[in-house]
Amino acid sequence: MNKKCKQCLETKDIYDFARTRDSYGKVKYLTLCRACKSANVSKSRKASKHIEIITNQDTVEHAKDAFVDDPRAINEILVGKVVRQPTYVPGDSND
Ligand SMILES: [Zn+2]
C-alpha cells in the first residue's frame, strides 16, 4: 500500500510513515513520511538552540556597572556642549 507525503509530495510505501493509534484504537498513519518528520524535528531543534543563545543574557553586558559615562559628558552637563572648531568658511564671505 502506498501513501502520498504531504510535505515532499512523493508517493511512498506505507511503512515509510509513522504509525499511531487514534482514541478508538484504530491504526492511523501520519501524513508526513519519516524522512520529512525527522528533518522537521532537527530543523526545530536547531531553531530552538539559536533562540536559547539569543535569550541567554550576557552577564558582563547586563552588569549594573557595565555602562560608564564619558568624563567629558559631566562637563557637558555643567557647561553645555562646547564646539571649539572655527566657523571659517573658505571664500570671501568671511572678510
Ligand atoms: Zn515526505
Image (cartoon, grey):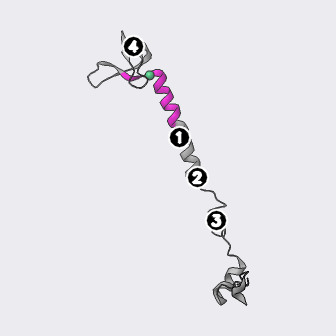
For marks 2 and 1, the one nearer the N-term is 1
Residue 63: numbered disc = 3
User: Which residue is depicted at the point 62% across and 63% down?
Assistant: 62
- Residue marked by disc 2: 56
Residue 47: numbered disc = 1
Few, some or many C-alpha atoms within 10 Å of disc 1 (few <14, some 14-19, many ≥20)? few
Instruction: Determine the image quadrant of residue 90.
Output: bottom right
Query: Disc 2 versus disc 4: distance between alpha carbons?
Result: 43 Å
For marks 3 and 1, the one nearer the N-term is 1
The kind of residue tagged 3 is Ala
The kind of residue tagged 4 is Ile
Residue 78 position in % (x across, y down) = 65, 89
Query: Disc 2 versus disc 1: distance between alpha carbons?
Result: 14 Å
User: Which residue is depicted at the point 66% across and 67% down?
Assistant: 66
User: Which residue is depicted at the point 66% across and 70% down?
Assistant: 67
Task: Name the quarter showing ligand 1.
Answer: top left
User: Which residue is depicted at the point 56% across and 47% down?
Assistant: 52
Give the label, 2 or 4, closer to the camera.
4
Whether 67 is drawn above or below 47: the answer is below
For marks 3 and 2, the one nearer the N-term is 2
